[in-house]
Amino acid sequence: MSRQWYFEDFYPGQEIDLGKRTVTEDEIIAFARQFDPQPFHVDPDAARDSIYGGVIASGWHTCSMMMRMVVDGLMCAASSMGSPGLDGVRWLQPVRAGDTLHVRYLTREVKASNSKPDRGVVWSRWTATNQHGEPVCTVDGMGMFGRRPMGENDA
């Protein structure tokens, strides 16, 4: 991404495509062994006998993959000042080995800070869909972004 994103570049209804990523069983199991070692995440035999019928990614793994795509596709080229938090996370469908996640960033609301004129807040929804176009996860949150420096042209 060659452009720099400032607070002023975000507007309600804006959608940003953050690309695709295919998930492997090895990475599902490795993540879960370290952070969420439930049987249906780490043990193929136990997972086969579970309600899921096979290994599925931890929801936290799905969120972590989405975060990586948001950083690579947007935040690395943005005046991001971090986030005061999330308003919601929903795991809508299991993510399985071989699934290809497609992540989109929807700007829901923007507000310039009254108390700190160097920044503004962007409320967003990240949506990951699988290769069938089915939503698998949504993240609703907010991020702080720096304002465009005085005298710098709009992108």
Image: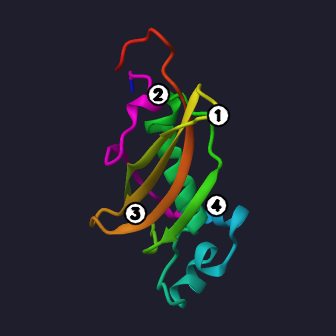
Labels 3 and 1: the sequence-earlier one: 3
- Location of mark 1 (residue): 115
Q: How many angstroms separate mark 1 from mark 4 (CA)? A: 44 Å
Using residue 30 as the reference point, say whether residue 139 is left or right of it: left
Image coordinates for residue 147, horizontal then vertical, percent: 52, 25
Q: Residue at x 59, y 57 (%)?
A: 86
Judge by depth and name the residue closer to the eye, 152 or 39. Answer: 152
Instruction: Single out the mark in the foreground, 2 or 1.
Output: 1
What amino acid type should be assigned to the residue bearing mark 3?
Answer: Gly
Q: Is 50 positioned to the left or the right of 37 in the image?
A: left
Q: Earlier in the sequence, mark 1 or mark 4?
A: 4
Real-space Cα separation, disc 2 to disc 1, in angstroms: 18 Å
Query: Residues under labels 3 and 4: Cα distance?
Result: 15 Å
Please identify, in this view, whether the residue under mark 3 or under mark 1 is nearer the observer: 1
Q: Which residue lies under the disc numbered 3?
A: 98
Q: Earlier in the sequence, mark 2 or mark 1?
A: 2
Q: Earlier in the sequence, mark 4 or mark 2?
A: 2
Q: Residue 98: x percent and y percent?
A: 40, 63
Residue ranking furthest to the front? 114
